[in-house]
Amino acid sequence: MENEAKKIILSGIQPTGVFTLGNYLGAVRSWKQMQEDYNCYYFIADLHSLTIHIEPQKRRQQTREAFALLLACGIDPEKSLVFVQSHNKCHAEMGWIMDCCSQFGELSRMTQFKDKSAKHPDNINAGLFTYPALMAGDILLYQADYVPVGADQTQHLEFTRDVATRFNHAYGETFKLPEGYFPKAGARVMSLQDPTSKMSKSDTNPKATISILDDEKTILKKFKSAVTDSEACVRFDPEAKPGVSNLMTIYSAVTGKTMAEIEAEFAGKGYGDFKTVVGQAVADELRPIRENFARLMQDRAYLDEEMKKGAERATYIASKTLTKVKKRVGLLLEK
Ligand code: AMP
Ligand code: TRP
């Protein structure tokens, strides 16, 4: 599986609910494509999810589901390393060391921390504050070359590079500096009800998001009620026609058609036809994922086995860096 000549790609996703069509088209689908060209490490960031307090049983369920979803989306454990973050103890240990290499001032400037603490003033826990240090550890442990992340995480990646640079400077060359990776095919999918804001797992209006596990009927219904405009013309213009443009983006991402081809295909047709065709294309794309997921969730022994294999290999790889880091900072290694 491992090929020394290939660059390392690493990314994590929090187990905070079923992925949306946005997660899929914007991230997970390209993770699948990258498996051929890179050594890919993908993990479920359950430690990061602890910054949000939910029912323990729900967290366990969501972690298992997120793992199964990655496999259902075509991440192949024979090709990629897939694991649950907390199953590799190196992350927590490295996280603490990274905490001690992070400055209060720089963590205070993180926009995600500012946003999340403003939104949830009742739970501004220390984990929310040091979240970027844990994330830096995730990345640096594996000497990743590239990290595919959305716009909301680029500041954390910059932070990771800063910490790594400082560490290398203070203790000698230890970490590779990771770069962001922005796949060309990654589409930014907007809410079906408010096409000026991103489609998000946390949206409270169920009509606004497509879950990748929605069935065909639900998908068609949600597309039918998607917000458009009164011009009745399928034309790509994100400023003036955000709703229609979003549907075109989705259709283009799923079928590979260009905007010009899509405009030609629907010339003279109404939005009703357009929405049905887009909905159908999405339903066809998601059907195998839904079926794979259902099958995987029935086979608990297989999932457990893959998690175990992933954890062992992740621990093996990460331990090498962690041991080096512990030596560098002067922790006495046990014999
Ligand atoms: P999150 O759901 O915020 O944890 O995001 C996980 C990954 O999915 C990140 O890489 C995001 O950039 C990506 N993602 C989330 N929502 C969307 C969206 N609406 N469009 C495109 N990519 C998205
Ligand atoms: N913070 C990321 C998010 O919420 C998840 C994550 C944790 C991550 N550790 C990572 C992503 C390391 C990339 C690399 O989306």
Image (cartoon, helix red, strand yellow):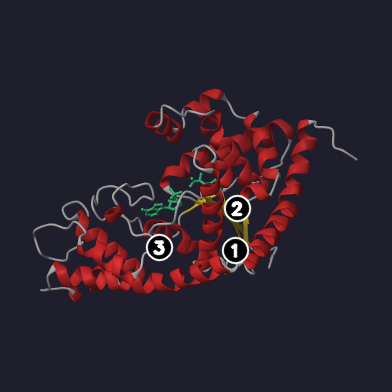
Q: Which residue is mark 1?
A: 38
Say if residue 54 shows up in the picture: yes
- State whether label 2 is within 8 Å of ligand 2: no
Q: Which residue is mark 2?
A: 145
Give the amino acid at mark 2: Asp
- State whether label 3 is within 8 Å of ligand 1: no
Say if residue 256 shows up in the picture: no
Give the amino acid at mark 1: Tyr
**Do the CB atoms of the residues marked 2 and 1 lie less than 8 Å apart?**
yes
User: Which sits in the foreground, 146 or 211?
Assistant: 211
For residue 117, above or below residue 156: above
Question: 10 Å neighbourhood of mark 1: few (<14), some, or many (≥20)?
Answer: many
Image quadrant in which you'd find residue 325: top right
For residue 25, above or below residue 49: below
Q: Quadrant of the N terminus?
A: bottom right
Q: Quadrant of the C terminus?
A: top right
- The image's mark for residue 127 is none
Point out residue 33 in the picture as x, y percentages from the top left corner.
50, 67
Q: Label 1 to label 3, Cα distance in Å?
A: 25 Å
Q: Earlier in the sequence, mark 2 or mark 1?
A: 1
Point out residue 255 in the picture as x, y percentages from the top left corner.
34, 73
Q: Earlier in the sequence, mark 1 or mark 3?
A: 1
User: Which sits in the foreground, 237 or 55?
Assistant: 55
Image quadrant in which you'd find residue 288: bottom left
Would residue 64 be found to the left or right of residue 270 on screen? Answer: right
Q: Label 2 to label 1, Cα distance in Å?
A: 10 Å
